[in-house]
Image: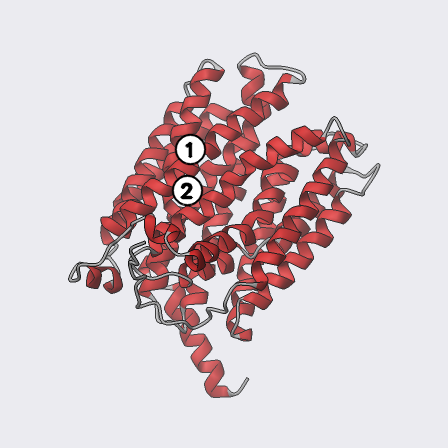
Amino acid sequence: MDLKTEDNATSSIKQALFHSTVLISGLGYFVDIYDLVLFSIVRVDSLKDLGIAGTEQLNTGVHLLDMQMAGMLLGGIIWGILGDKRGRVSVLFGSILLYSLANLANAFVTNVEQYAVLRLLAGIGLAGELGAAITLVSESLPRHSRSYGTCFVAAIGVSGAMFAAFIAAVCTWRTAFIIGGVMGLALLATRFRLLESNMFKSLQDHTVKRGDLRLIFQSRERFTRYVRCILVGIPTWFCVGIIVTFSPEICRALDATGPVSAGQAVLFCYSGIVAGDVVSGFLGQWWRGRKRVVAVCLASTLLAIVCFLNMRGFAPIVYYWMSFALGLATGYWAVFLTMAAEQFGTNIRALVSISVPNFVRGSVVLLTFVFRSLIPVLDLTMSALVLGVACVAVAFTALVGMKESFGADLDFIEEHNPI
């Protein structure tokens, strides 16, 4: 790298890191991730407190997780449509308000039914934050700074999971939910500084369809493009939603020498994801391509899953460090989301950027169903292994058919083609 190129890279990094949209979006994603993973961390303690014990903890935990993820599927569509019709910033306001209030209320539940309803509402709220932030940052930064901006948003945001693990370790589960709700409400004040991107503003001067879900389905090529984006991201949430969330049960099946804390597993996993997001973001910029980065990450994820689920008789600290390695391998979240945003026109970009990560997250509903269905046939660890390998294989296949979008001009629209 010559001196001029190095100076340009340094300038791009500073431009992205100190951009107000990047910082505020990153903090919003921080609270989003905190609330998103908090249930996984406090699942056992909260269910014990509500009188759920023994084998019912796993089934009840899966049900509550499914409710949260179902909310995110629904919210991904709702906020995505609003993001293209009303604006990206409006979604950042509305989503954080909903999930902050829902998580505050979560601190006062007295039974599983209340818990389930509030996880559904929280899921709807959580659905809008990340996609709207990535869309706004992608449209606001110059193309030479885009990779840095989105990877900084992801790195700042994902560290919210580590904070959630820390808070859960020093506070009761009810207090942890209150802290998340208060942080979200406090962050609302910073959102008044955010401005809509010029690309979105320019759409208001044209009679173009915005946020129309039919635009995705009316073209086979466009629909295939959309599905590929979802499939590429599924291994990330398999690792978080299955292996890390149910780490106490998986560890017992692997004959660990001591109990494993889900909170510590989340802490180590998301520490790896933070590092992976930064590394993959910079690699994408330096290699001037995103597909190769995602391919390397998918190969690493496959290796980590196979090694992870074939260990036996290990100490808990080994499990935690393997969780870190798993997080590092799946740390292509920012690159994957940037690719999704770059694949589609401005008039449905928010719809895609918001719905795609939520369909990825929401895929855990199907994944947990398949996981539980395989357990009686295989066993706990073999079921996870088979499912994990299948997820990575599907993601590889989807990635091959995607176009390289590094440095693409985002100022275009998807045309309406009447059927």
Q: Amino acid at mark 1?
A: Gly
Determine the residue located farthest toward the right in the rendered image.
Answer: 313
**Residue 103 appears anywhere in the view:** no
Q: Is residue 9 left or right of residue 262?
A: left
Against 385, residue 332 (above or below) is below
**Residue 38 appears anywhere in the view:** yes
Q: Earlier in the sequence, mark 1 or mark 2?
A: 2
Q: Is residue 324 left or right of residue 417?
A: right
- Across and down, in percent, residue 127 comes to 40, 41
Quarter of the image containing the C terminus?
Answer: bottom left
- Across and down, in percent, residue 283 comes to 56, 69
Please tell me whether mark 1 or mark 2 is closer to you in this view.
1
Residue plotted at (67% across, 47% down): 390
Residue plotted at (43% across, 37% down): 72
For residue 335, the mark is none
Q: Is residue 81 left or right of residue 30?
A: left
- Give yes or no for contact between labels 1 and 2 (Cβ–Cβ under 8 Å): no
Residue in the foreground of this view, choosing between 309 and 73: 73
Classify mark 2: residues with Cα within 10 Å, few (<14), some (14-19) or many (20+): many
- Across and down, in percent, residue 81 comes to 30, 46
Determine the residue located farthest toward the front in the rendered image.
Answer: 419
- Across and down, in percent, residue 246 comes to 64, 32
Against 242, residue 144 (above or below) is below
Q: Is residue 144 left or right of residue 312?
A: left
Classify mark 1: residues with Cα within 10 Å, few (<14), some (14-19) or many (20+): many
Q: Which residue is mark 1?
A: 71
Q: Which residue is mark 2?
A: 31
Q: Amino acid at mark 2?
A: Val
Residue plotted at (81% across, 42% down): 311
Query: SS at mark 1?
Result: helix
Residue in the foreground of this view, choosing between 316 and 142: 142
